[in-house]
Amino acid sequence: MSWFAIGALAAGAGVALGAFGAHGLKSRVDAELLVIFETGVRYHMIHALALLAVGWAATRWPGTWVTASGWLFLIGILIFSGSLYLMTLTGARWLGAITPLGGVCFIVGWVLLAVATFKTR
């Protein structure tokens, strides 16, 4: 699996979604929902860059720990940012209840990436 390629694609999608939010949603949703969308884009972009780091880390510390961190970052983007995008577009506030699951994926992904550096030395 090429985590670097996945990170690059995720970053491209993040830029597109950011542009959509700034230009396509600004006049269609209220300011509070736009802030929610922008939060999704911010975490999406941070973790797209994290996937690029996973791609690099996989060349230095290959193994299960790095791979697991990549999956958690990807799943985190889908759950955390995805739920915020959907909440903005649909107005379904209940989606906010699943957003923290994506945040937990991000946190655990960072911890596993750190563990990878210790476990493979």
Image (cartoon, rainbow, N blue to C red):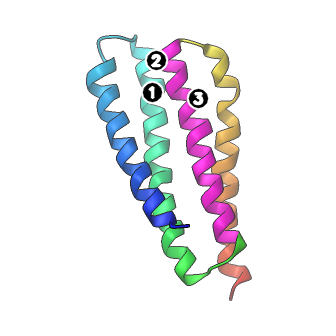
Q: Residues within 10 Å of mark 2 (few under 14, many from 20)?
A: some
Q: Give residue 110's mark.
A: none
Does residue 70 appear in the picture of this structure? yes
Residue for badge 2: 33
Q: Is residue 81 magenta?
A: yes
Q: Is residue 4 above or below residue 16?
A: below
Q: Residues within 10 Å of mark 1 (few under 14, many from 20)?
A: many
Q: CA distance from mark 3 to mark 2?
A: 12 Å
Q: Amino acid at mark 1?
A: Phe
Give the side of residue 80 with respect to residue 13, left or right.
right
Task: Give x and y (percent) for residue 52.
Answer: 46, 64
Q: Is residue 47 above or below residue 42?
A: below
Residue for badge 1: 37
Residues at circles 1 and 3 in contact by the CB criterion of under 8 Å: no
Residue for badge 3: 83
Q: Main secondary structure of the magenta part?
A: helix
Q: Residues within 10 Å of mark 3 (few under 14, many from 20)?
A: many
Q: Is residue 104 magenta?
A: no
Which is more foreground, mark 3 or mark 2?
Answer: 3
Residues at circles 1 and 2 in contact by the CB criterion of under 8 Å: yes
Give the side of residue 69 with respect to residue 23, left or right.
right
- For the point 51% across and 60% down, the residue is 51
Task: Give x and y (percent) for residue 115.
Answer: 71, 72
The mark that comes first in sequence, 3 or 2, is 2
- For the point 58% across and 29% down, the residue is 83
Q: Amino acid at mark 2?
A: Leu
Looking at the image, which residue sits at the far front? 1
The mark that comes first in sequence, 1 or 3, is 1
Q: Quadrant of residue 4?
A: bottom left
Does residue 115 appear in the picture of this structure? no
Q: Amino acid at mark 3?
A: Ser
